[in-house]
Amino acid sequence: MLNIIWFVLWGVLWAVYFMLDGFDLGAGTLMPFLAKNDKEKRVIYNAMGPLWDGNEVWLITAGGATFAAFPTTYAVMFNGLYSALLLLLFALIVRGVSFEFRGKVESEGWKKIWDFCLFIGSFLPALLLGVAFANIFRGLPIDENGIFHGGFFTLLNPYGLLGGILFVLMFLVHGAIWIAIKSEGDLRNRALSVANKIWYLELIFAVIFLVVSAFATDLWENYGKYPLLWIIPLLAVAGLILIKIFLLKEKDWKAWFSSSLFIVMATFWGVAGLFPRMIPSTINPEYSLTIYNSSSSPLTLKVMFIVALIFVPIVIGYQIWVYNLFKGKITDKELSYEEAY
């Protein structure tokens, strides 16, 4: 039972990370194209600034939970996806540094360098996360010893790239809505316009990804075995449609929560399709890593579960407080603070 509980928690941690850091990655990717002057760039920086590092706590937690609850899966994942994950780490480091360094020197050239770093540090993680998870859904070429038979370019297959594109589009819409929430005037209007336009691409690639998944993976099989799981894709569809409805009504927060629902349910869709596997093997299904053959001992899972029950609510409560504290729009007054980016 603890194996199943930790599998569900594993999926929840990744879904929450994609929901929270997704708007940061999307906003950072859009910033060079959406902002027309330095003031608008600073608005976007400050829309992310107080929140991005807290959002990435969920990435660390998801990785830590994988390591502690499913160590074999963690080992194989970081073996097979090593190059992609290392590139992801470097991109996130560059992105974090750009927040702190951009305003240290009053030079246009200096600021352009860090603006580019923010863009690369936002776009690459969005793309790589999509590629990585699409490959996990599809399966990796691992043998009976968990050895990965492939390289970085093995991951750049059509299905993996399709997943990468979908993640980028999801995060772009999510980020554009967040910029609209945090900004005023022309910047807000442009952000809403961009979100409305990219939504059509998001819809198209979401449909393509789901259809291709029926041929490239066996994720849909669990939905035939357990009809109750159909609530997950139905909620994902509802979230995607509601994004457009609320965008047209210019109800920014409702559009953002709808986008959050879509991202979370899209993640759950893949995780539910994997169960009880963690990483399917494309060499032989019997070599797949599951929640049973790759998990830690029952005692470890029990102790971790108790720790999670204590500290996860604390983290959630803290983040709710932070988001409530910085829920207002970025105005000239906020930009004038010494702490502003």
Image (spheres, rainbow, N blue to C red):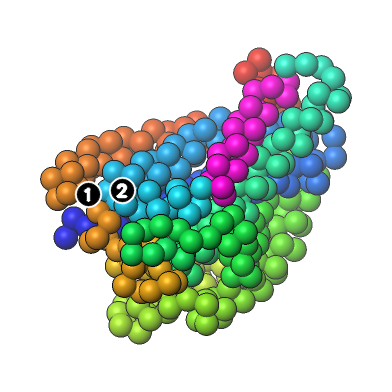
At horizontal 48% and vertical 70% (from top left) the residue drawn is 138
Secondary structure beneath label 2: helix
Q: Amino acid at mark 2?
A: Pro
Q: Is residue 329 above or below residue 148?
A: above
Q: Upstream in the sequence, badge 2 or badge 1?
A: 2
Residue 188 at x, y percent in the picture: 73, 46
At horizontal 18% and vertical 55% (from top left) the residue drawn is 2
Q: Is residue 328 left or right of residue 196?
A: left
The quadrant in which the C terminus is found is: top right
Residue 254 at x, y percent in the picture: 55, 56
Disc 1 marks which residue?
A: 296
Chain part drawn in magenta = 83-103
Residue 86 at x, y percent in the picture: 55, 42
Q: Is residue 48 left or right of residue 213?
A: right
Residue closer to the observer: 160 or 272: 160
Q: Can I make out residue 259 in this image?
A: no
Pointer 2 and pointer 1: residues touching (CB < 8 Å)?
yes
Residue closer to the observer: 112 or 71: 71
Q: Is residue 52 left or right of residue 31?
A: left
Asked where in the image residue 318 lies, by quadrant, the reply is: top left
Secondary structure beneath label 1: loop
Disc 2 marks which residue?
A: 71
